[in-house]
Amino acid sequence: MALYLIGDLQGCDEPLQRLLDAIAFSPSRDRLLVLGDLVNRGPASAKVLRRMQGYGDAAQSLLGNHDLHLLGVAHGARKVGRKDTLAAVLEAPDREAMLDWLRHQHMAVRHDIGGGTLLTVHAGVLPQWTVDDTMRVAAELESALRGPDVADFFRTMYGNEPARWSDSLTGAERLRVIVNALTRMRYCTAEGVMEFESKDAQAGAPKGFMPWFDVPGRKTASATVAFGHWSTLGWLSRPDLISTDTGCVWGGCLSAVRIGQTPQDRELIQVKCPQAQKPG
């Protein structure tokens, strides 16, 4: 059995098919884990969701910011944005089946492989969280998404504050920090204060901030953390890190990473993508 991590799809089903052909994916033999943002901006979000559902236990996804946005719109907490391409999902006869499948996906997944730990999230992990902490807070958020009060959760999910984690946080503020760390964060301070405006990795970190994975003393540094979300960062492979968002929807590549006997045993497979969304 092979485990493949796949970067942000954002509704790009045709490149996904070509990537699966390139890796000779077999649902009876292999496992897919998409690192969030299955939907939005690209042309075929409904096709992506149906494909993933159709693979059954062979495929799962993390929830990214665009996936949560779709669920928030579907539950009346937000309106469709000007650049959103979600109508094919929201107006589909099988809408409820797709949305129910989506909200039962994970916020973080852990694999213990060959004596090492592979932790997967969509965006990032706050420096004061251990792997166990990350899985615990992800489970809190998953419980809210799957519970009977999910519509209330989405009405309080949006916002940038609090910008810093505290174990004393409760209720909507606690969940909002978890959402923002796992699905939106790129930069933070050494103390874990998050910044949400800067996206261009080539421009460098804003003053006083650094990429979340470069914070000294980060408590997940002994694990390998795989994530997506940051297309301007692109492919990055270090012993403690795998960055997988290579900008498919922007005309870059769609990437799969085959994980071998240890988290450090990895192979990159990519396909070129037509531009489906213009920056800006």
Image: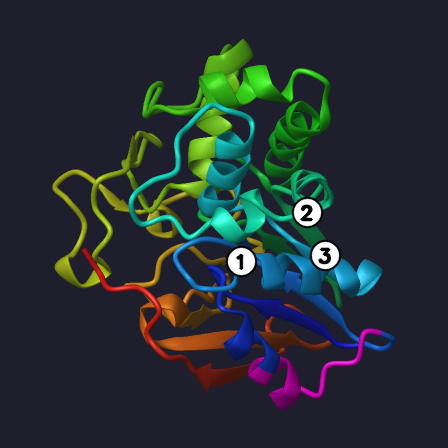
CA–CA distance between discs 1 and 3? 27 Å
Q: Nearer the viewer, residue 245 or 154?
A: 154
- The residue beneath circle 2 is 93
Residue hosting label 1 = 45
What residue appears at the point 72 percent right and 56 percent down from the top-left corner? 111
**Residue nearest the observer in this picture, 255 or 147:** 147
In the displayed structure, would residue 271 be above or below residue 189?
below
Amino acid at pointer 1: Ser
Secondary element under disc 3, as helix, strand or loop, is strand
- Residue in the image at 45% along x and 46% along y: 66
Labels 1, 3: front one: 1
The residue carrying pointer 3 sits among few (fewer than 14), some (14 to 19) or many (20 or more) residues within 10 Å by Cα, namely: few
What amino acid type is highlighted by mark number 3?
Answer: His
Query: Does residue 221 appear anywhere in the picture?
Result: no
Residue 76 visible to an observer of this rendering: yes
**Position of the C terminus by quadrant:** bottom left
**Residue 93's spot in the image, x, y percent?**
68, 47
- Distance, label 1 to label 2, CA atoms, is 14 Å
Label ID, residue 212: none
Q: Residue at x 15, y 44 (%)?
A: 206
* Residue located beneath label 3 in the image: 111
The vertical placement of 222 against 255, above or below, is above
Expressed as whole percent of the image width and height from the top left, the position of residue 161 reads 33, 20
**What are the residue bounds of the magenta stretch?**
18-27
* Residue 20 counted in the magenta span: yes
